[in-house]
Amino acid sequence: MQEKLSNRINNLATSQTLAMAAKARELRAEGKDVIGLSLGEPDFNTPDFIKDAAIQAINDDYNSYTPVDGYVELKDAIITKFKRDNNLTYTYPQIVVSTGAKQSLANVALAMLNPGDEVILPCPYWVSYAEIVKLAEGIPVEVSTTLESNFKMTPEQLEAAITPKTKMLWYSSPCNPSGMVYTKEELRALADVLAKHPDIIIVSDEIYEHINYIGGHASMAEFEDMYDRTVTVNGVAKAFAMTGWRIGYIGAPAWIARACNKLQGQVTSGANCIAQRAVITALEAPVSKISYMVDTFKTRRKLIIDLLNEIEGFETTEPEGAFYVFPNISSYFGKTIKGHTINNATDFSMFLLEEALVATVTGDAFGNPECIRISYAASEAQIEEALKRIKSALSE
């Protein structure tokens, strides 16, 4: 029946993070003790003060359709947050609240891209970037980076990737999956290249902003010459442990925000009313109220890096943010272990799932075929056991 589906859906790749999570669930259903280090989901509960706000919203009878682009009170909280945390000044018409930052990204792509438009994606990039671009009939242009460059794109690489068809640049900082953070100086160097190409729109995905171990988060829109051409994407899923609440948002030039609002009005309309009320409370709270989660992630980061360094064949850098490590495992390519021939990162990731019962994600999904992504959004005991299993499986 595949031929009865649209070319659009037939050409769309399945999310590898979700596919690996589904495979891990299947193995668990068979009674196998799988440790999941594949999903980008904090293992904390949503803080009580946020849950209390949701309960209050239910008791206050918030149950009606919401404005397509979000409650005014939530926009107030977002505007205040942008000013407080990012030194960015936005107004109501520049804010659009969506059902997760993923919808925010899809809105921008579908509102901006025409067939054949090129979108520059520094590799590694978040797994859905390329597929969202392709869904909007754009062309992903991958710019490869390496472990040695801390997985960051250089100004020279950016300049070389730009063509007359370049419409946008998308990137995340802190980066999923590498965990690396662009400094303000590094962003300025990229902005100097972009200044020569005034028609290119920048999408800055800052969903991991608060999970930052080096301090000094920088936003591309902070630069005066980039402000009117940058879409700043954020949300509450990661730093506030609110993945299932599904609230993301953008701060953007008003003309782009209007287009996203128009699109969203025909697709999903406004985001969940109860979740929006809870997010008001989350964003109005001082960032210090979630620092305990960041501190825990930092401790886990040291643990997993130390354990990875004990395993021969893993090359990794110390992540500066988010909660992932992205080791290069290409030294295993061409080898056969326990009957498994490892030709690429996908083979390696499947080997770890089947033999070590540890779920990771292949780097192919992120535009880097020599690496795998390992999430340390798990307990220290799970991390220790997972790395013990991996070391044991590879020792043969």
Image (cartoon, grey):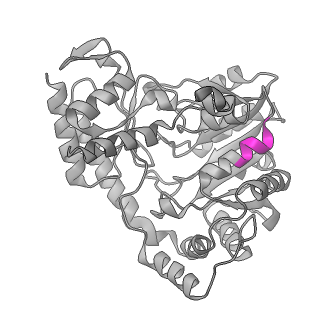
* Horizontal side, residue 126 vs residue 190: left or right: left
Give the quadrant of residue 189: top right
Residue 335: x and y in percent read: 26, 13
Q: Residue furthest bottom?
A: 60
Instruction: Provide the residue span drawn in magenta.
Output: 107-113
Give the quadrant of residue 198: top right
Q: Is residue 84 above or below residue 99?
A: below
Residue 109 colored magenta? yes
Q: Residue at x 61, y 34 (%)?
A: 131
Tell me, yes or no, if residue 310 can be seen here: no
Residue 162: x and y in percent read: 74, 24
Q: Residue at x 20, y 46 (%)?
A: 31
Q: Residue at x 56, y 75 (%)?
A: 278
Viewport quadrant of the N terminus? top right
* Horizontal side, residue 201 vs residue 9: left or right: right
Q: Nearer the viewer, residue 173 or 259?
A: 259
Q: Is residue 167 above or below residue 302?
A: above
* Horizontal side, residue 86 vs residue 117: left or right: left
Per the picture, the main secondary structure of the magenta-coloured stretch is: helix
Q: Residue furthest top?
A: 334
Residue 108 colored magenta? yes
* Horizontal side, residue 342 vs residue 395: left or right: right
Residue 10: x and y in percent read: 61, 29
Give the quadrant of residue 135: top right
Q: Is residue 10 above or below residue 262?
A: above
Residue 235: x and y in percent read: 58, 59
Q: Is residue 183 above or below residue 164?
A: below
Q: Residue furthest front?
A: 1
Q: Nearer the viewer, residue 35 or 175?
A: 35
